[in-house]
Amino acid sequence: MGSARDDLTLVREANELFYKAFERLSLEEMEAVWAQTPGVVCIHPGWRLLRGWQAVRESWTLIFKNSGEVRFTLTDLRIEVAGAFAWVVLTENLLSQQQGNVAVTSVLATNLFQKLDGKWRMVLHHASHIIAGPSREESRTVH
């Protein structure tokens, strides 16, 4: 059995592999990150809920086909591990280029991983656009 420290490191690495696959627009690398089961869920910003590996895979195929260069800077990253599950909550600062236009977007994301056959696999990715600033309470909170 690995230690909690090992699991934190392995979850961090699995999360990094997810974003590397996205940056490389690599379906093969994305497939290696996800648990390919009917229970996986993906919610892209502005999309309907996608349930099951086939629907999730098709979404990545479409996104990669229609994307130019994509680069992530990840901030506010927090990892929690509880038994066979781990979640990463973070801000995706995304620099993208499509048809000559460059866009910078910040997206809040939750990535849920499950330890399957000794490997951490993504079972949920939920990303939401940030459309409002922090509340008064949040802006006064020191982290």
Image (cartoon, grey):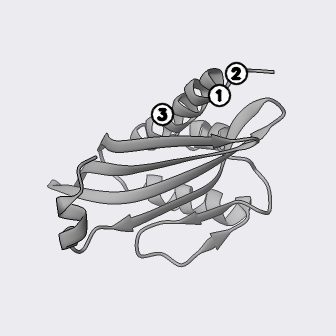
> In front: 9, or 33?
9
Question: Which amino acid is tagged 2?
Answer: Ser
CA neighbours of label 2 inside 10 A, class few (<14), some (14 to 19), many (20+) = few
Quarter of the image that includes the N terminus: top right
Residue 63 visible? The answer is: yes
Q: CA distance from mark 3 to mark 1?
A: 14 Å
- Which quadrant of the figure has residue 37? bottom right
Residue in front for this viewpoint, 65 or 137: 137
The quarter holding residue 52 reads: bottom right
- Using the numbered discs, state the Cα–Cα distance from disc 3 to disc 2 in whole angstroms: 20 Å
Mark seen at residue 7: 1
For marks 1 and 2, give the one nearer the viewer. Answer: 2
Tag in front: 3 or 2: 2
Query: What residue appears at the point 34 percent right and 50 percent down from the top-left corner?
Result: 92
Q: Pointer 2: what residue?
A: 3
Name the spot of residue 88 as percent of width and height, x first: 51, 46
Look at the numbered disc 2 and give the secondary structure of its residue.
loop
Q: Residue at x 66, y 27 (%)?
A: 4
Count neighbours of disc 3 (C-alpha within 10 A) and say few if under 14, some if 14 to 19, many if 20 or more: some
Camera-side residue: 69 or 39? 39
Query: How many discs mark residues in the rendered view?
Result: 3
Tell me the number on the disc at residue 68.
none
Proximity of marks 1 and 2: CB atoms separated by less than 8 Å: yes
Q: CA distance from mark 1 to mark 2?
A: 6 Å
Q: Secondary structure at mark 3?
A: helix
Q: Which residue is mark 3?
A: 16
- Counting residues from the start of the chain, the first of labels 3 and 2 encountered is 2
Residue that lies at the very extreme toward the right in this rendered image: 117
Q: Residue at x 61, y 27 (%)?
A: 10
The amino acid at mark 1 is: Asp
Q: Quadrant of residue 51?
A: bottom right
